[in-house]
Amino acid sequence: MSGLSIQNVKKSFGQTHILKGIDLEIPDGEFVILVGPSGCGKSTLLNCIAGLEEVTEGRILMGDIDMTYAAPKDRDIAMVFQSYALYPNMNVRKNIAFGLEIRKMPKQEIEEIVDRVAKLLQIENLLDRKPSQLSGGQRQRVAMGRSLARQPSVFLFDEPLSNLDAKLRVEMRTEIKKLHQRLGTTIVYVTHDQIEAMTLADRIAIMRGGEVQQFGTPQEVYDEPANIFVAGFMGSPSMNFLRVEVGGADGQYHVLVASEGHTYKLPSPPTQADLSAYVGKQVILGIRPEQLTHVMPHLESGPFVTKVAVKVEVTEPTGADTLVLTRINDEECECRVHPAEAGKPGEMMDILFNMEKAVFFDSETEARI
Amino acid sequence: MSQTKVNDARYKAITGRAILYAVLVIVALYYLAPLFLMIVTSFRSMEEIRVGQLIEWPKTFTFDAWAAAWNQVQIGAREDLGLKPYFMNSIRMVIPSVLLSTAFGALNGYVLSFWKFRGSELFFAFLLAGCFLPFQAILLPHSIVLGKMGISGSTLGLVFTHVVYGVAFTTLFFRNYYVNLPGELIKAAKLDGAGFWMIFYRIILPLSTPILVVSIIWQFTQIWNDFLFGVVFSDPNSQPVTVGLNNMVNSTTGEKRYNVDMAGAIIAALPTVLVYVVAGKYFVRGLTAGSVKG
Amino acid sequence: MTTHNAQASVLNENKLDGNRMSTSKRSKGIDYWLPKLVLSPTVAITIVFIYGFILWTTILSFTKSRILPQYEFVGFEQYVKLFLNDRWMGALANLAIFGILFIGICMVVGLVFAILLDQNIRAEGALRTIYLYPMALSFIVTGTVWKWIMNPTVGIEKFMHDIGFSGFSFDWIVDPDMAIYTVVIAGIWQSSGFVMAIFLAGLRGIDTSIIKAAQLDGASLFAVYTRVIIPSMRPVFFSAFIMLAHIAIKSFDLIMALTGGGPGNATDVPAIFMYQFSFTRGQLGIGASSAVIMLMGVTAILIPYLYSELRGEKQ
């Protein structure tokens, strides 16, 4: 078992720079998720860790051993691929055993390991089938079984759930989480699905354009996003971004929002941001839909809560809540309200703005204030 | 009103189908006619042909023409008679040529798909252009080099020639087949610790059966049917059956024996036609592999 | 527990391995060299036997080589001789006639029968097999058969006379003005099924939702083919054309077996010209120059094809 240290890793193809200096320190046993839009370099980074692609610059350490230029087979790494990459010509048993056979493990031991892995993943009854005879979920299990059998010190997952249907995806997500809790092995997991990232990770690395935007726990990246990109990427529905003007003085600051001809002063909690340098200037207010609710008496009196009358434009029921789309400061803004409280399109309704978790971004640099 | 209209349309459709099928069958007969004529004629005797018709069922079936074509007719000045020695030359030539060119093609395709390196794509483009090479452009130097190598006019020389100029096509087949296999398969195998040969034998080769069949059939047909290399690079002791047939048909001595010519043509065509009948699907795939992408 | 230990030791070894590798920074493993080694014979063959020999032939075409190659350079003399040679000009004219008719008719026949076969025909497999089997034959066999069928004294002409059509005449194969058309007939018989197979594969490759959309737009079957399907098969037309043009320029065996280039030189084509001047008439220089001209012809057709092919791959 060992941690993983990625130091200033760069990867270029000619003039195209895929990775522009990645630094990640991953302690032993941590579940780290690389997330980001397609083309952000997350899969390339995973391939570099696996040794399937050679880095242009930088170092990759496992434990305290420099593995930057080691061959994939010498890295003590196992990988689960998006397409599962099961060997179509071998049955499940052979698929799981292949890596052990090549490592010249005695037959007896291979059998024991295959049986143990099959039991762990509940695929004992599939051992003699060919991959083509398996369902998507079963293939997924076999692919995991193949990497488990090797008992590597690091697992890599490359979008392992993206080929499964929604229900199965949730099931397998839980399964992977349980497995990690049980084995405690370091996992690096690539996905473009931020819900997967939130639910599974110990820490999330959000990537864009070959750079890590933020590396932190799910709650950190959700509540304290480093910049607008991270704030917008994590969370569904996405955070609302409103251009607002800052007012106030002496540690008591507020921002101004307008709705249907009225202007409201929304107080900014001093714990969230120091807006002293921005008085009279524009900043970007980031506020998640769940902070914009229907009127709830127990909240209404809160120190950072303001009641705003808005016009309902569109409603989107999700079952548990209804999302109400409205316009604030002439920008679209989504609120999460109780289904029974939601107004109809064209009607006015009161919304509580809870600024307790609001964040502010510099409108130039897009970094959080 | 509407009732009759519907009937009309249906009636029209049925006539349309009938005409369609009639056309297709007539065309099929056009394609089949020469084959039919060949077979029928090869079983007729020469007397019958002389007094009779182009198209006529044999009054008496006789294998005389077949026997003559196989090992009785004098072709050129050689001692052993008939097409048989040429046929044997073709077999001796075609088997090693097909196996070697296919083996090279498989390995090349494997490298060009899964072990790309700087310049490998460029090389593939150059090799691809070689598929379209008009052989006239290399005939002269090649005959000089075969002479220098001491294998001109021999079956070995022909095998060498067919392998050298067949590799471009076999490589194309395998490369285009392999690039459609998921690349993650190779990555997984590398992480499992398998090396170059291990991945080839244990993973790629077992998946290659269809393209192996395509390549073998294609090469077999091409090499068996080749005439240009046969006529340029072989001497009477190594000439393939296409050259033998051409010599037999065009020998000017004696009476033209059409039944023997046809029997000879069938003998020369038999191996490739059999392959076509047995594995036509793969034959078509080979034909279209170079022309239709994907 | 023992398994665990055994595996752990395996892992340790691996780690040591990794360590050793990393110290010599970019030392390449056997898997780095092996692919190159495996490819190297083919690279050598391609360089020497394809591109090297093309160069060699080109060099020969600038020498005064006759029966034996010699390397006394005479500039473009052989090319001048070549284009002053009536036989060569005749061969080029024949190739033009043969090429245009062969390619044109094969494309039309192939497309028409591909469309007809695409109408849910019951015996499609069998019909396709029949249309395509000539492609499995050697051109020598095709030539032998058609030579006999078209021979006026024993073939179709005699047959028609015997069944009463005494005015019927089909003696093209012995008529110097018409003999080249017999080559066209035999060539089409052999290759049109192949073109049909290409077109049929192209038709089957079209996204059926496009066709459904066109039908919902109210297009008739005819309009669906002419307005939607055929235009979207442009790449297929292109590759069928390339294959046929390639067959036409290289055509040698068929003519050798069917007419032997005759009567006289009436069906001479560049491939036969090249063969005879190089190997039976001892005129290596002219033979080489004719080969270079043929190569240039193929290249002229091929370059746009490869260009579009490579551009397509990039997209």
Image (cartoon, rainbow, N blue to C red):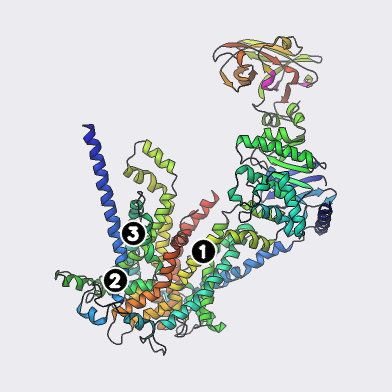
Question: Is residue B178 shown in magenta?
Answer: no
Residue C187 placed where, x, y %? 34, 66
Q: Residues within 10 Å of mark 2 (few under 14, many from 20)?
A: some
Residue B84 appears in the figure: yes
Residue at left offset 35%, top offset 83%: B68
State the residue position of label 1. Answer: B213
The quadrant of the image that shows the N terminus of chain B is top left
**Same-chain check, marks 2 and 3:** no
Q: Residues within 10 Å of mark 3 (few under 14, many from 20)?
A: some
On the picture, is A1 further left or further right than B122? right
Q: Could you say whether the residue bearing mark 2 is in a helix, strand or loop? A: helix
The chain carrying label 3 is C
Relative height, residue A199 to residue A274 (above, below):
below
State the residue position of label 3. Answer: C104
Q: Quadrant of residue B269?
A: bottom left
Residue depth check, mark 1 versus mark 3: number of the one nearer the observer: 1
Q: Quadrant of residue B205?
A: bottom right
Residue A47 appears in the figure: no
Q: Which residues are magenta?
A: A277-291
- Closest to the observer: B76 or B121? B76
Q: Are marks 1 and 2 in contact (CB under 8 Å)?
A: no
Residue at left offset 74%, top offset 21%: A357
**Same-chain check, marks 1 and 2:** yes
- Closest to the observer: A102 or A34? A102
- Closest to the observer: A329 or C142? C142
Relative height, residue C267 to residue C298 (above, below):
below
